[in-house]
Image (cartoon, helix red, strand yellow):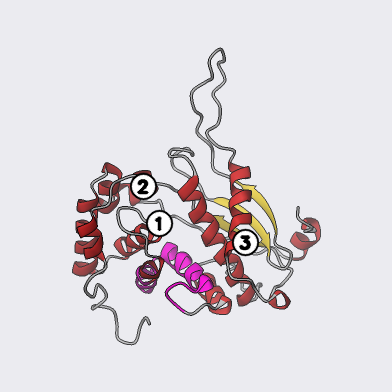
């Protein structure tokens, strides 16, 4: 387990796991429906309408994901951070976790693992506060990057619906991980001459690889500031929105998504 003494670490401390329900209700969202149909113009139109008319926290979260992953619009991680930040201000816990990762990455805001940990804690990770905010911010940043990599690279329909979060146990000081649970995997067609349907993906192997890739991608932490405690982290593997990834962006509408001030109704003094 990458040098992690799991028995000792878990016996010494049990740290709570925040829940992630990014997929809950998204299937019925008008923006997501348009993306899944491949109608990018309609998706952007619906997003602009919901954001400017009523500052919908769900629309802002979905818009952040679209911008962050290049779904129906040009990929723009910096603009995505603004959407996640505003959705967080309006109370969306899933956006809060994505925004915490943005703080840890320094995308759209100053890089700061300490502040990322504060944001992640407020979103429900390590609710009893047993991990330092610096360690938690590092862990939550890796978590965010790993989840995005998986949603972007896994085959469509890889998991049974509804998709439960994967749970990863992580020790920041050693980078040791253990995949504690993974969603149930769909199976493809049986090979010729066989009745056995092959799983579409080895979920645990894919999660472990994405986590390693995320560790290599995030800003290097101050090792002396990382604690030995183990934290349990949920990975958002719901691909309701990503199902429409191959939809062709409408360049005119994609640009219009980023124009104007979508955040004019935000309370004074909030944001950056």
Q: Read off the residue under disc 3.
A: 216
Residue contact between numbered discs 1 and 2, judged by CB atoms under 8 Å? yes
- For residue 221: magenta? no
Give the distance between the C-alpha atoms of the residues marked 1 and 2, in whole angstroms.
9 Å
Residue 37: quadrant of the picture: top left
- Whether residues under marks 2 and 3 lie with C-beta atoms below 8 angstroms apart, the answer is no
Helix, strand or loop at mark 3: helix
Q: Looking at the image, can residue 115 be seen?
A: yes
Q: Residue at x 34, y 53 (%)?
A: 71
Spatial CA distance of label 1 from label 3 is 19 Å
Sequence-wise, the earlier of marks 2 and 3 is 3
Residue 126: x, y in percent?
Answer: 60, 67
- Asked if one can make out residue 18 in the rendered structure from this viewpoint, the answer is no
Question: Residues in magenta?
Answer: 82-109
Mark sitting earlier along the chain (1/3):
1
Q: Residue under circle 2? A: 245
Q: Which residue is mark 1?
A: 69
Residue for point 21% across, 73% down: 260
Q: Is residue 215 left or right of residue 60?
A: right
């Amino acid at each position: 387990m990458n040098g992690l003494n799991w028995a000792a670490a878990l016996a010494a401390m049990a740290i709570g796991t925040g829940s992630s329900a990014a997929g809950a209700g998204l299937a019925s969202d008008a923006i997501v429906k348009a993306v899944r149909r491949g109608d990018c113009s309609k998706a952007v139109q619906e997003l602009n309408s919901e954001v400017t008319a009523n500052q919908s926290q769900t629309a802002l979260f979905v818009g952040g994901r679209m911008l962050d992953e290049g779904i129906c619009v040009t990929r723009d991680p910096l603009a995505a951070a603004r959407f996640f930040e505003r959705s967080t201000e309006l109370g969306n816990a899933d956006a809060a976790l994505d925004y915490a990762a943005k703080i840890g990455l320094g995308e759209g805001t100053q890089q700061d693992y300490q502040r990322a940990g504060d944001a992640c804690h407020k979103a429900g990770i390590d609710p009893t506060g047993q991990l330092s905010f610096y360690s938690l911010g590092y862990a939550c940043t890796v978590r965010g990057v790993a989840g995005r990599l998986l949603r972007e690279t896994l085959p469509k329909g890889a998991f049974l619906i509804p998709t439960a979060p994967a749970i990863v146990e992580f020790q920041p000081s050693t980078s040791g991980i253990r995949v504690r649970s993974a969603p149930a995997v769909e199976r493809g067609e049986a090979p010729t001459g066989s009745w056995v349907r092959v799983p579409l993906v080895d979920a645990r192997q894919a999660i472990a690889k994405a986590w390693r890739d995320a560790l290599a991608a995030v800003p290097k932490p101050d090792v002396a500031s990382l604690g030995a405690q183990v934290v349990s982290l949920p990975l958002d593997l719901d691909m309701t929105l990503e199902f429409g990834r191959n939809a062709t962006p409408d360049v005119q509408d994609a640009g219009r998504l980023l124009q104007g001030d979508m955040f004019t109704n935000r309370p004074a003094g909030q944001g950056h």
